[in-house]
Amino acid sequence: MKRHVMVSLALVVLGAISGCGESGPDLSSVTGSVLYQGNPAAGALVIFNPVSGEKGSLKRPSAQVADDGSFQLSTLGAADGAAPGDYLVTVLWLEGGGGSEGEQGLGASQRSKAGGPDRLGGRYSRPESSGLKATIVAGENVLPPFELK
């Protein structure tokens, strides 16, 4: 729980910094869940990478998976959702921790030092090869579970 609060706070700060001086996109509520072999992937980091748009944008919606497997996406602030559009989804689930927004850009060896190796062996860590996709529409979005193997 403490880690979840810290990640949420980091997302709020990052959103405040990156959103200064601009009105920001219209965001829609997004909830879902992540399961690994039928069990909640508690602590995993889920990142939604826009199919179109700037590849290096800091405004990638993300969330840490709760103990029950659920998540609520955040873009500019805690649980504020994501902009409508198509996304390639990545999941990083570090041994000893779930990861954080700041660890997204780290290389494999740096991630290992930050929280251990990826429990998923990197299978879902690249947008182009994760096989996970989502479409966000205006309004409330309840996504089907991402079932990882």
Image (cartoon, grey):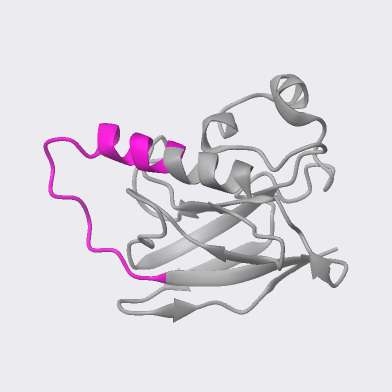
Q: Position of residue 132 (x, y in %)?
A: 64, 63
Number of on-image labels: 0
Q: Nearer the viewer, residue 26 or 55?
A: 26
Does 102 appear above or below 27? above
Q: Nearer the viewer, residue 66 or 54?
A: 66
Q: Nearer the viewer, residue 137 or 95?
A: 95
Q: Nearer the viewer, residue 89 or 94?
A: 94
Q: Position of residue 71 (x, y in %)?
A: 57, 63
Q: Is residue 51 left or right of residue 95?
A: left
The quarter of the image holding the C terminus is: bottom right
Q: Is residue 18 magenta?
A: yes
Kindly identify the residue that appears in the image at 36 percent across and 35 percent down. 14
Q: Is residue 69 magenta?
A: no
* Quadrant position of residue 130: bottom right
Does 114 appear above or below 104? above
The residue range painted magenta reads 10-29
Q: Is residue 133 left or right of residue 149?
A: left
Q: Position of residue 105 (x, y in %)?
A: 56, 29
Kindly identify the residue that appears in the image at 77 percent across and 25 percent down. 112
Kindly identify the residue that appears in the image at 64 percent across and 57 percent down. 65
